[in-house]
Amino acid sequence: MNPPGEARASARLVLLACLLLGALGLHRGLWTPDEPREAEISREMALAPTVIPTLNGQRFIEKPPLYYWVIAGVFRAAGQPSGDLARAVSSLAGLATLLAVVAWAARAGRREAGLLAALLLATSVQFLVSTHWVLIDPLLMLFTTLAAWAGWERLAGRGRGPGWLAVLYGALALALWTKGLIGVVLVVFGIGVATLAGRHDWRRLRPCSGALFLAAMVALLGAAIYAEGGRSALWEWAWVNHVQRFTNPGATGHRQPLPYYLWTLPMALLPWLVPLVDGLATALRTILHRRAAAPGDALQRYAGWLAAAMLLPLSASATKRETYLLPLLPPLALCLALRVTDWYAAWHAARAGAGWRWWAQFPLLALYALAPGVAALVYLRRADPPALLALLAALAAVGLCLVAVLRDRRPLAARAALGCAVVGAASLLVLAPRAIDAQKNMAPFVRWVDTRLPPGQPVSALNVDETLAAIVPFESGRSVIALDAAALARTGSLPEWLLQQEADKGERTPVPPGYALAGRARFGSGRALSLWRRSAAAEPAAGAAAPAASRAAPPATAP
């Protein structure tokens, strides 16, 4: 046990590191494909608050409105929409989740493990990326973590009053209004399995009263959707975006094979693979040999069973994405942190040197710290000062960690190892926008298009998808009119300006004859935008490259 003064200093350092990581990397463009869509839906919600979200003025009912209400409120409070503000909501949700994990462990008498869990979570790849992205999932993660914590307090017998019950079912209701039934299903299924595995008294959760309350929340949400959009809107929300996404997503989701999370979960937890593998091996041995766990491991068992159970409905769904793992990462990080603190206590008390776990984990931490700086220098092909500074900081952290363990200075080695993870995470947040913003941010080209068109004129576009239908109104305030090139050619009614998108590996709808190319920009290998102007003098073949117009070229957004 650390002295009180040292414990307080460690807590301050952990919280400072989490705040630093939360603040870095927020100032950049809206990156394709998700960020423009979520930001524009929130902007339209700020202009005209509704229950059913809209995108480019059209109903977009994939998700309930709570997340968009939150972002819209931030936009209105700030006086204008901003990608940075929308991204800050994800970061704040991530920071609140880290604080919840620390408080959860502290109430269970494992404060050091809670601080370690916060650092493991804050520096893991998926948490780091998702909480710096304009996404619904970080807010969902906050609500599911609060519900999981409240469930533990009730099952452990410390939360006897109605307060923790209110937190449990209130957080589940917020998860429902954030992303639909999946948030409720994940937590209810997870707590149910953890309750049975830990032989807790399930009656402490008041399941009948909770079920009635959640049913009322579902009915309230359904009634609100029906009142605003009618039967078709309710059908789309309840059937298309719940049942069909689960069984057969088709064009509405991301179809992946059943074992998809077997390889994506380790990637999500990078660089903390050794605790994950060792924890899974220990749990498997306990189950196979029917060994009884120590009474002090109750929180570890609860968090482990909760995370494992939440993975089952995620895997059963045909629609899978790495970001869907966010709700199970906090309890999993807490479970792993409890395991790691036990390792460290045993290592600190023993005379033997660092064991295999250390020498397996250290190369991963060294690679995690060094990789962002090296990758940025290779990609940018120049001596970029921030990349050089990041590389020097990584070398210092890795060197200090190695020297400390070789000299058997164990407390310093542990702090330096965590420092490697923090340096790697901070370097990634700082350097990634410098390297790839030009390929992911369509805003500069869209703003250039806005200067070409007459004021107030909608943007006529070919090959419109959700990203294009979002980034144009968000950056210019203009609506997007999706056009069909063949119909245009037949009718002969050609708009003066035409925006063409190439997406999905370069596929594009050809531009009708009679247009001259005004400007073009490419965004990575799979997306490009071209602006065309109707010109009687131009004679391009349909879809062929035409000479650039005499007007100023758009800003270069990619090589």
Image (spheres, grey):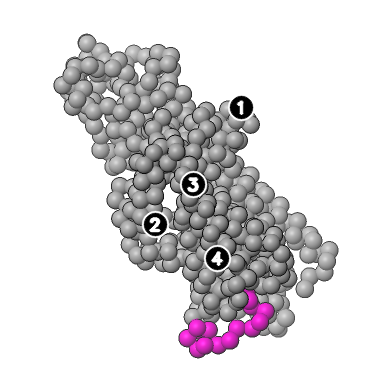
First in residue order: circle 1 vs circle 4: 1
In the rendered structure, which amino acid carries the disc numbered 3? Answer: Leu
First in residue order: circle 2 vs circle 3: 3
In the rendered structure, which amino acid carries the disc numbered 4? Answer: Cys
In the rendered structure, which amino acid carries the disc numbered 2? Answer: Lys
- The overriding secondary structure of the stretch rendered in magenta is helix
Vertical relation: 320 (above or below) 31? below
In the rendered view, does 491 fall on the left or right side of 382?
A: left
> What residue is shown with label 3?
221
Neighbourhood count class around disc 3 (C-alpha, 10 Å): few under 14, some 14–19, many 20 upward: some
Q: What residue span does the magenta drawing correspond to?
A: 285-299
Please tell me whether residue 540 belongs to the stretch shown in magenta: no
First in residue order: circle 2 vs circle 1: 1
> What residue is shown with label 4?
208
Q: CA distance from mark 3 to mark 4?
A: 20 Å
Q: CA distance from mark 2 to mark 1?
A: 36 Å
Q: Position of residue 447 (x, y in %)?
A: 45, 24
Please tell me whether residue 287 belongs to the stretch shown in magenta: yes
> What residue is shown with label 1?
79
In the rendered view, does 165 fall on the left or right side of 230?
A: right
* Numbered disc in front, either 3 or 1: 3
Instruction: Tell me what residue is drawn at x 82 percent, y 69 percent.
Output: 3
Using the image as rendered, state which of residue 427 and residue 197 is in the foreground: 197
